[in-house]
Amino acid sequence: MTALIETVGVSKAYGSFVALDGVSLAVASGELLSIVGPNGAGKTTLVNVLTGLLKPTSGTVRFKGQDIAGIGPVLLAKRGMARAFQLVHIFPALTVAQTIGVAVVSQASKSFRLFSSVATDAALRSRVREVAAIFGLDSKLDTESRLLSQGDKKLLDIASAFALTPEVILLDEPTSGVSSGDKHGIMRTLMEAAKQAGVQAIILVEHDMDLVAQYSTRIVAMKEGKVLADLPPNEFFNDPAIVAAVVGKLVGKMSRRAV
Amino acid sequence: MSVNGLSAEATNSKEPRANRLRRHSALLVIVMTALIVLALFPIFAQPYYVTLVLPAFAYAIALLGFNLLFGYTGLLSFGHALFVALGAYGAAVLSSKLGVKSFEVILLVSGLTAVAVAIPVGLLAVRYVRIFFGILTLAFGMLFHSFLFKFYDITGGDTGIRVLRPALLGNEFSELDKTTFLIGPFYYYCLVLLVVLGFVMWCIVHSPFGLHLTAIRENPRKAEYLGVRVRTFRLAAFLISAFYCAVGGVILAINTGQADPETAYWTHSGELVFMTVLGGFANFFGPLVGAFVFIFLKSELMSLTQYWRFFLGVTLALIVILFPRGVMGVAQDLWSKMKRTQ
């Protein structure tokens, strides 16, 4: 199977500081790839390179065979990759329906329609409702985003990314700042939504090893800008050295869970 | 589960629609009442007050554009007097130097000139946000102001240029004296212009394009990831606002019969901001209300005291502190309080 996303020897340096050092990885259709590693390992830089926000100092980034180095978020969204952020990124004063509507409008290439009405666009409205329903937000369509609970804000952030009907979706700690009880709820909704929306691959940046273990098909561990390991979950968690390097202090807790 | 979801969905979509209809009909009644009052105003009011409505029309149109940029896109310009002045000088040059009589041609050419100037200015300015955008627009406004003084031959320097009476739809109304023309045919022409341009702006802010502008205001980074071309859209809003401001400038200049360099001065840009905040930038009608309240407030204060600027300043300070959502914010609060007590 050909890779959807592929990086070859990607490096990113800020002056003398090397954030990424020769990272090569590939994501194929059907995968859920988790990127893990301690703070400062280069995860965010890698995500920024993968989403075309940062141009790597050297190496290539390809999405569906095309070079996407530094093409920027707008073009990337057009080509079929969406991203949700670690910190909740919403439009505070817009309603749930409007927020999802923003993505539906760009996806349908309707953004330069100056004189048609959003309120009477039946196709747009039904698509908005459809996406909201997948994430259980359909009863809150007219609620302003800033009034939602933290968990719903997260879901809305992710829902708006899904509304782009992406082939690949990149989730930067989708469950951070959410109570541990809600985490699994969000992940289950996410997996279900991905299935319904026809998302082919998910890249997940996550600190919570519980979630990583449960949902990943493959795990890439990073440290100091390098890929430390690229393994399926069972092999990953059976290698105490790697787990220790990645998880650090949490190793005690982890091993208890693994048992 | 899916059946439940569907039924919940149906009731949910019906309920807001009924509400929306009720809200829209209430809005329509208010707008129609305001229009009828404005249409009858020249009949029952003294000519002096009628001549005050003309600049209010002019500012109302200018602010419709200004607020697309400020209230909807989130970019606060401190230099939009530049485009108002371009409209005024466009009217002056066309009418008294090039002999153009047609008001329609003057409006269109002045508006498009402002858009042409707004392209390079906007291209530079929309690269920045917040205070940097404000300062950059302020700088361009000042640049134009000093241009008006330096190029005496074209602009008439500090005396400006006379603006001749235009022909409305080919009719010169030469039998009417100046005031009768202004508070008669010109008044109604401008009222229609306000309604048409207001309706166009209403469409724009409720369009997919308008939705993307508000997304940019709320969170440009997130908007980008949802496929919104942030800079292109900021520029588009900038150009539309320039056109509206120029149309306002044309009306102002015809009303006073003079294109004055003070029109381009930065305090005039400040007045645009003042009116918008006074009326409430979070509401579509806020800037329109702001324009009318400002013009009448200023006129009343000027007739009461020579320290009118001081009192205008105090008013603005009080509004920002006590009613940050402006006159329309207060009106909306009263409206919802009334509905709750009913």
Image (tube, grey):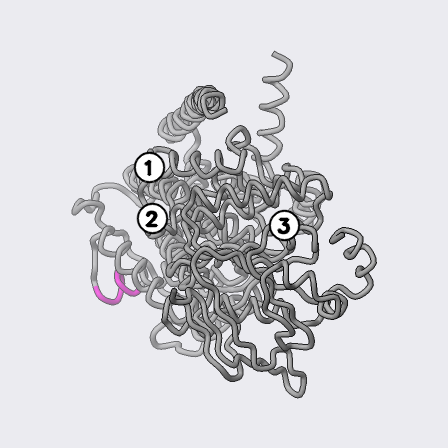
Residue sitting at x 72%, y 67%: A246
Amino acid type shown at disc 1: Ala
Residues A175 and B137: in front is A175
The answer to whether residue B226 is seen in the rendering is yes
The answer to whether residue B75 is seen in the rendering is no
C-alpha distance separating marks 2 and 1: 10 Å
Circle 2 is placed at which residue position?
A: A108
C-alpha distance separating marks 1 and 3: 37 Å
Categorize mark 3 by other alpha carbons within 10 Å: few (<14), some (14-19), many (20+): few
Q: Which stretch appears magenta?
A: B93-98
Nearer the observer: mark 1 or 3; the answer is 3
Categorize mark 2 by other alpha carbons within 10 Å: few (<14), some (14-19), many (20+): few
Residues A77 and A10: in front is A10
The quarter of the image holding the C terminus of chain B is top right
Mark 1 or mark 3, earlier in chain: 1
The magenta stretch spans residue B154: no
Magenta stretch: dominant secondary structure? helix
Residue sitting at x 21%, y 49%: B167
Mark 1 element type:
helix
Circle 3 is placed at which residue position?
A: A214
Provide the chain ID for the residue under circle 3.
A
Amino acid type shown at disc 3: Gln
Circle 1 is placed at which residue position?
A: A123
Are the two marked residues, 2 and 1, in contact with CB atoms closer than 8 angstroms? yes
Mark 2 or mark 1, earlier in chain: 2
Residue sitting at x 51%, y 68%: A50
Mark 3 element type:
helix
Mark 2 element type:
loop
C-alpha distance separating marks 3 and 2: 35 Å
Quadrant of residue A38 in the image? bottom right
